[in-house]
Image: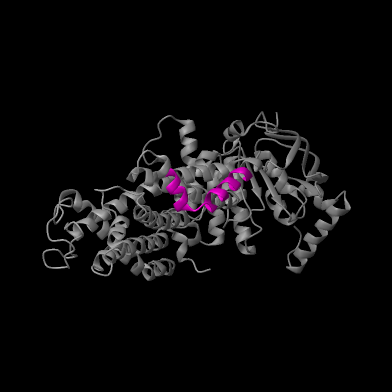
Amino acid sequence: MSALLSVQGLTVSTGGKTLVSDLSFSIGSGERMGLIGESGSGKSMTAMAVTGLLPANISVAGSIVLDGQEVVGTDDKHLNRLRGVATAVVFQEPLTALDPLMKIGKQIGEPVRRRLAREQAHAPRGAVEREVLDLLDKVALPQPERIANAYPHEVSGGQRQRVAIAMALACRPKLLIADEPTTALDVTTQAEILKLLDGLVRETGMALLFISHDLPVVAQVVERVMVLRDGVALEEGTVGDMFANPAHDYTQTLVDAARMFDEALGRTGS
Amino acid sequence: MTALDLSADRPSRRHSLALSIGLALVGLNVAVAILTLFWTPYDPLNASGGRLEAPSLLHWVGTDRLGRDYLTQIMIGARTALIVGTGAVAIGASIGVTLGILAAFATRLLDDVMAATLDILIAFPTLLLAMLVVAASDSASLWSAILALGLAISAIVARLTRILAKRVLRQDYIIASRTSGTSWPGVVVRHVLPNIWPTLSVNFALQFGLAVIAEASLSYLGLGAPPPNASWGRLLQEAQGTVYTAPVGAIAPGIALVALVIGMNLLADGLRDVGDPTRGRSR
């Protein structure tokens, strides 16, 4: 089986500074993988490189094959056909990731409309609206009609992140990239969003690339983890292995930190 | 309704007074301008009374040096002002917004060149630029004045659009929209233009007012609409010689000019608050 996403020797640099160096990993269809590291470790850079949306002043070397298409060096017009089809992204900040002047229903409707236009020549009337309400329902938002007619500033942070997830789902991507989707949320909301993401990924069978600085969070939704530090991959393995016998000191500290956090909360095991 | 909706309503109610006054002033002007297409109190081109008559029941604002009804002239002046303001802003907006968006997307070097060029153009006095364009065209006409003012406005609009668009393009929701497959033109239409519109529209209204004043200045200098097109600027110029004997001739077009410009500014202010749904949010 050929991988859905295959990254080989990815090096990202800007102005003589290397942000990600010689990174290689692959994700098969339906597979769920986590990318962990502290701020500045190059996790988000890697995600943006996969979508081909890094700013022009950041140079990318190596190879990223997404759904059979090489991303590095391909022009934007061709890459744009992959976006939303092969990948969709959920971002960290649910407030800034939504257009403040566009009603939520319309924002989710855009990718739906594009997908329907791609799939069938003539979408029946009201198909977009129906699917938008469906999606809002799927991400467990109460009163979909009201939310669809609201502006982003009129709903709560957790609800906004659900909207952002609905927008990503609207594309029906083969790979969902979640870039710290729970970091900006409080702990209770975090757990709800994780549960939602986990359920949706299982239900739709899409692959997931989950980016986080938080090992316990990642462990809840993925099978395999890669640890990044200063743009270098330290180790890669299944979640179980990583917790049982971390090969690298840095991973050990992450695991210890996670344990300490759990103990502090009075939780047992993980 | 929920508390959220109430708090969103409050600011627009606070500004509704500005909006109402603005609408009234501009609306009156538009109504008068349209009316003159079908009816004026007197023939604007021929004398209907004695020379320099004081205001009376027959001639509410008196008559000019040639005995023509002054109110008729001012009413037609309203039409001229509206045509100039609308035309100049339309030209300025279409050229300016296009250039500004292009500059926001251009490479660093091209963007710098465009920014510097715009700064030079803006440093050039609008009136001087307009006079040059009018002088360069064969004869002074309303259209050369509109074109000249439109070009001057386009430089200001382009610079503003460039800055606003660049700021919007840096927002997370642009990247978010791009990751779901929106093309750059799609991003401009769906996200950039709606998000810069509140600020741009206020600027358009401001430029409208300035264009009306500039046209009056050009007419005052004899470079605007030639007779028989009545223009408030030309009325002011003609009234200059008789300002002590017949002050109404200078005051009346002056009031009309100020009313339209103030009305336009109030309207813009009010519209911005109504048009921006995030305005209700307390920061």
Residue A242 on image: x %, y %: 81, 49
* Quarter-of-image position of residue A46: top right
**What residue is drawn where x is 35% and y is 41%?**
B139
Residue B184 lies in the magenta-colored region: no
Q: Is residue B279 left or right of residue A258?
A: left
Q: Nearer the viewer, residue A244 or A181?
A: A181
Residue placed at 82% from the left, 50% from the top? A229
Give B141 or B27, whichever is nearer the viewer.
B141
* B119 inside magenta stretch: yes
**Which segment did they paint magenta?**
B112-133
Query: On the picture, is A25 further left or further right than A171?
Result: right
- Residue, x 25% and y 64% (percent of image)? B249
Name the spot of residue A67 as percent of width and height, x first: 65, 31
Q: Nearer the viewer, residue B212 or B189?
A: B212
In-front residue for pair A142/A267: A142
Can residue B190 be seen by looking at this rendering? Answer: yes
| Residue A176 horizontal/vertical position (percent) | 62, 43
